[in-house]
Amino acid sequence: MHVYHVASSTVNPLTFQDLFQFVFHHFSGSPVIDAVGQPIRVRPMQFCDNMEQYASDTETNATLTRWARRPASAERLRKAVIAQIMHLGRIYEPYTFYCGRFDIANTEALVAEMSEDYFINVHVPGVRKHVMKARGSSP
């Protein structure tokens, strides 16, 4: 039996940053269309090194973005949204900030056979079609 770890090692075969760069590239070229027929623009993903940075960035982004333009009465909603985002961060913390090491030789061999083109033109469109159930459409 071959085990394929997509995880941290001395060399990570597929980092979150690489994966999200492929996703960004795909959705930049083939955006999802919103309910009024406009393409939904995506921005590159920002990455945090630890939960403290994640918490700080979450609070800062919530303060500086659309929440800054809302009336003071929306403060309770803003706090609830931040609490939910932080809850999700704590749930996924073991998977995103875990510093364990795994044998990834099988995965490295597999990724060596694959290319950026595969991720952008095959893998991400497959996730979009089968996982996202083709929500939205491409122009």
Image: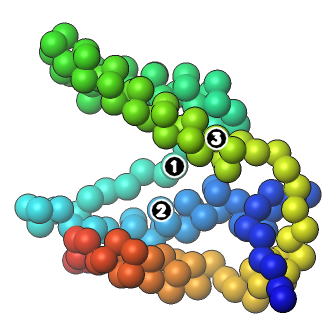
| x 44%, y 77%: residue | 127
| x 78%, y 77%: residue | 4
Estimate the spatial distance between the alpha carbons at disc 1 and disc 3, rounded to whole Å: 17 Å
Between residue 11 and residue 26, name the one nearer to us: 11
Q: Nearer the viewer, mark 1 or mark 3?
A: 3
SS class, disc 2: helix
Q: Earlier in the sequence, mark 3 or mark 2?
A: 2
Confirm or deny contact between disc 1 and disc 3 (CB under 8 A): no
Q: Position of residue 21 (x, y in %)?
A: 56, 61
Q: Which residue is mark 1?
A: 45
Estimate the spatial distance between the alpha carbons at disc 2 and disc 1, rounded to whole Å: 8 Å
SS class, disc 3: helix
| x 84%, y 89%: residue | 1
Q: Which residue is mark 2?
A: 24
How many neighbours does mark 3 have within 10 angstroms: few (below 14), some (14-19), or many (20 or more)? some
Q: Which residue in the rendered view is the most extreme toward the front?
A: 1
SS class, disc 1: loop
Q: Earlier in the sequence, mark 2 or mark 1?
A: 2
How many neighbours does mark 2 have within 10 angstroms: few (below 14), some (14-19), or many (20 or more)? many
Between residue 59 and residue 92, name the one nearer to us: 92
What amino acid type is highlighted by mark number 2? Phe
Q: Is residue 95 above or below residue 20?
A: above
Q: Is residue 50 above or below residue 6?
A: above
Q: Position of residue 11 (x, y in %)?
A: 87, 61
Q: Which residue is mark 3?
A: 93
The answer to whether 19 appears left or right of 112 in the picture is left
The answer to whether 28 appears left or right of 36 in the picture is right
